[in-house]
Amino acid sequence: MDPLEDVFLAMRVENALYARLEATVPWGLKTRRVDGTARFGLMLRGACWLTLDDDSAGQAPAALAAGDCFLIPHGLPYTLRDAAKSPTVNCVDAVKDNLGGVVRVGGAGDGPQTVIVSGWFNFDPDGARPLLDLLPPLIHIRGDHERAQLLQSTL
């Protein structure tokens, strides 16, 4: 058994959902807090800003670029957007009919497109607590980091 499999068994992962986000400027997607859930994403194309919408996180906005991966292990609310002032849509409204499919948000024009494979998995919070207590609010791995290739393959 590999170490990652051990971690998921200890966390008692119950289910996982994902979608491919295709966003054209201007765009923004806002999520809500969901305890017992970890969120993840892999930037396939383009760039955007990720902001944790929880003051207790004390985290500055993170600039994401193609190849980057992110993990939000504590279910904190967050916003993805192309620019600081871009309008946002509620993630639940945008995704509800497209799980496992393609979600399109933003402008209808031919502007730059950002593509992200994003999702979440639910787990038993008690089984995951020992691991979660060790993790920061946001894990951001840049695509140019040598370890990113392994994570990209996993996602």
Image (cartoon, rainbow, N blue to C red):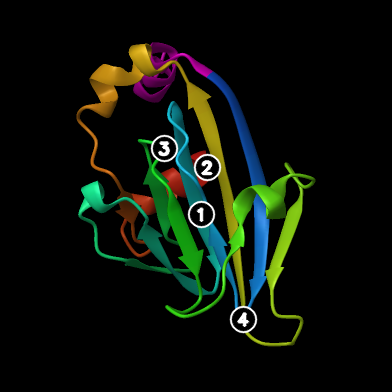
Helix, strand or loop at label 4? It is loop
The residue that disc 2 covers is 155
Q: Is residue 63 above or below residue 2?
A: below
The residue that disc 4 covers is 25
Q: Mostly what secondary structure, the magenta segment?
A: helix
Check disc 1: other Cα within 10 Å, few if <14, some if 14-19, many if 20+: many
Q: Which dot, 1 or 3, sits closer to the camera?
A: 3
Residue at x-position 65% and y-position 59%:
21
As drawn, the label of residue 75 is: 3
* In front of the other: 61 or 2: 61
Q: Which residues are magenta?
A: 1-13
Residue at x-position 41% and y-position 37%:
75
The residue that disc 1 covers is 42
Residue at x-position 52% and y-position 42%:
155
**Where residue 108 sits in the image (x, y, percent)?**
76, 81
Q: Label 2 vs label 3: CA separation?
A: 18 Å
Q: Quadrant of residue 146?
A: bottom left
**Where residue 85 sits in the image (x, y, percent)?**
46, 80
